[in-house]
Amino acid sequence: MESTRNLRYFLAVADAGSVTGAAEVLGIAQPALSQAITRMERELGVKLFQRTRRGATLTAAGEAIVDDIRLSVSRIEAAQTRARDIGTQHGGRLAIGFVSAALFEVLPAAIGALRKDAPNVKLSLREMSNAEQASALEKGEIDLGLLHTPVTVGGKMHEKLIASEPLLAVVHESFPVADDGKVSLAELADIGLVWFPQDQLPGIRAGILSAFRKAGREATIVQDANRSLTVLACVAAGCGASLLPHSTKTLQFAGVRLCEVRDGEYLPPFELSAIWPQRSRPTLADRFASLLGDTVSRPRAAARKKA
């Protein structure tokens, strides 16, 4: 922009103390710089510099506006940088919702990759339940959700499967585990389960209870807990046992023990997926999703909300 360029020329002459010195710093011809300053003075109707053989010094009028111009140029440059960053997806804001399981491995790795790829992006991170994320995606309150699938989300969305993990048994540290280090579904049924509320993960909950029935036992949910850490705390307190994804092993949580399930073939996998809106143009959410592993994303059909 020519007007901004002239302001920069003015500051260069003020800082260098001469038109010749400023022209060298700017890498332009001295006559062109002199003409630009003259045009600026003509437009303002005042002299900005007192020019002598020894250089160019600011007049009272020039002194009066130099700080304002310096601040204006700084703000203009910042605005131009933001515009370029957003236009090239190297800047802007990205709101991400996530379930607890994403904290263990997926989210830290993706954030680290984004910081290298687009360091000026400002992240808003919100730990939320599956149901909270589904609602937030539909309302546009978050740009991308990291949540457990299957899940019902209204609107046209992309879905990318990031991880499909086996479930591990979580028992109290004092629980007598067999020599092979595994526990059975029957043993877990005897203790009772600590699990997420019905409205959070209904599909996985149903699959788990079905697995117990296939193993010849009925399991009872003895305690609801809406976060993985809360589940672990409840197990440590002796409220019951639980089943959590394999990545939970990365946590060091006192009072619990994680074991493989001897007859775990009946159990459903614990899926972690990214879901984000489909847009006509590439978005920061698309860029972030591309950093979440190598699984190919797939369009997600608009889902009707259950009554």
Image (cartoon, rainbow, N blue to C red):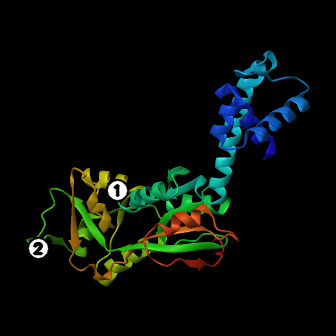
Helix, strand or loop at label 2? It is loop
Q: Is residue 185 above or below residue 107?
A: below
Where is residue 205? Give x, y as percent.
42, 71
Q: Which residue is mark 1?
A: 231
Q: Earlier in the sequence, mark 2 or mark 1?
A: 2
Q: Nearer the viewer, residue 82 or 130?
A: 82
Name the residue at the left extreme: 179
Name the residue at the top extreme: 60
Name the residue at the front extreme: 53
Which amino acid, mark 1?
Val
Can residue 186 be spotted in the picture?
yes
Can residue 199 be spotted in the picture?
no
Looking at the image, residue 251 sits to the left or right of residue 122; the answer is left
Classify mark 2: residues with Cα within 10 Å, few (<14), some (14-19) or many (20+): few
Q: Is residue 64 above or below residue 189?
A: above
Cα distance, mark 2 to mark 1?
25 Å
Instruction: Give the residue at x 63% y 60%.
Output: 88
Q: Is residue 3 above or below residue 107?
A: above
Helix, strand or loop at label 1? It is helix
Where is residue 176? Give x, y as percent.
12, 63
Instruction: Give the residue at x 57% y 54%.
Output: 95
Where is residue 234? Give x, y as percent.
31, 53
Query: Residue 180 has which mark?
Result: 2
Which amino acid, mark 2?
Asp
Looking at the image, residue 115 sits to the left or right of residue 177; the answer is right
Count of numbered marks: 2
Looking at the image, residue 18 sits to the left or right of residue 96; the answer is right
Instruction: Give the residue at x 27% y 78%.
Output: 264
